[in-house]
Amino acid sequence: MNDIWNPWHGCKKYSEGCEHCYMYYLDSQRDKDGSEIYKVKTNFNMPLKKSRDGKYKVPSGATIRVCMTSDFFLEEADEWRKEVWEMIRSRPDVTFWLQTKRAERVFNNLPDWWGEGLENVIMVFTTENQKRADERLPILLDLPFKHKGIMCAPMISEITLDKYLKTGNFECVLVDGENYDGNRPLYFDWVKRLYDECVKYNIKFDFCGTGNVFIKEGKVFSTGTYTELMKECSEFRDLVRGEYRDKDQE
């Protein structure tokens, strides 16, 4: 990932994973209300901005994560999104990473010219538990996107993705625990299960982090034992990298 583009800011809490939203927490530290939604005028056209020499500030080949302090398919952003789609279409040399929990809003909010989708867009659905995975992922399977991914974050219960991954329609799975003022635990066994499923179907797996509370073999790691927590996290990352290296060499 190379950059973040927030054409609008603020969101409405939508499901269980939103309970301890990091954006709400960070806004509260600035005495702001995260539920206030507004267009970020100074950065709205970020992909089109150019430097004095006429070159795009976002270089060719970059990947941009869009709406990391909101939801790309937020209802309040419907009018702004129309402009954003045009900017995405005008930069086929840049990859745009879109994320949403609002699965049911996606199809009706694609542009008229969308067809089978754009090569430079990856659509990622967030699924914090099995209930939401089973609600949202069947919808994503049927949507016209050339690239699709799954993000289990914050992962607040055990999830199996086997029946979705075996379709061959997903390119990546990301997992993260709950951070900032959230303390719902992430279990090593949950992460390992998803990792094993990804290896089974040769799908990229990214363990983003443990969150504030990480439990492995009955031992609880928290921000109070940060050094040990990071050691456990790095060991698992090494395991992931090592097994993928072995797989690539087969």
Image: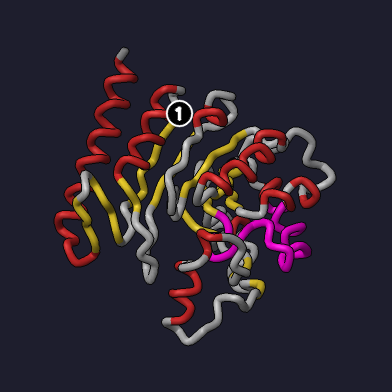
Q: Position of residue 160 (x, y in %)?
A: 47, 36
> Going 30% across and 16% down the picture, which residue do you hit?
249
Residue 183, percent from left and from top:
35, 64
Instruction: Tell which of 199 and 90 is nearer to you.
Output: 199
Which residue is pictured at 44% across the width and 55% down the height?
A: 154
Helix, strand or loop at label 1? It is: loop
For mark 1, what is the residue?
203
Question: Does residue 20 sit above or below 32 in this rendering?
Answer: above
| Residue ranking furthest to the top | 250
Q: Is residue 128 visible?
A: yes
Amino acid on which the number 1 mark rests in the picture: Ile
Where residue 153 appears, x then y in whole percent?
A: 46, 52
Q: Is residue 193 left or right of residue 228?
A: right
Residue at position x 54%, y 58% in the image: 53
**Span shown in magenta:** 66-87
Label 1 Cα neighbours within 10 Å, binned few <14 / some 14-19 / many ≥20: many
Per the image, is 79 magenta?
A: yes
Q: Can residue 94 be seen in the rendering of this structure?
A: no
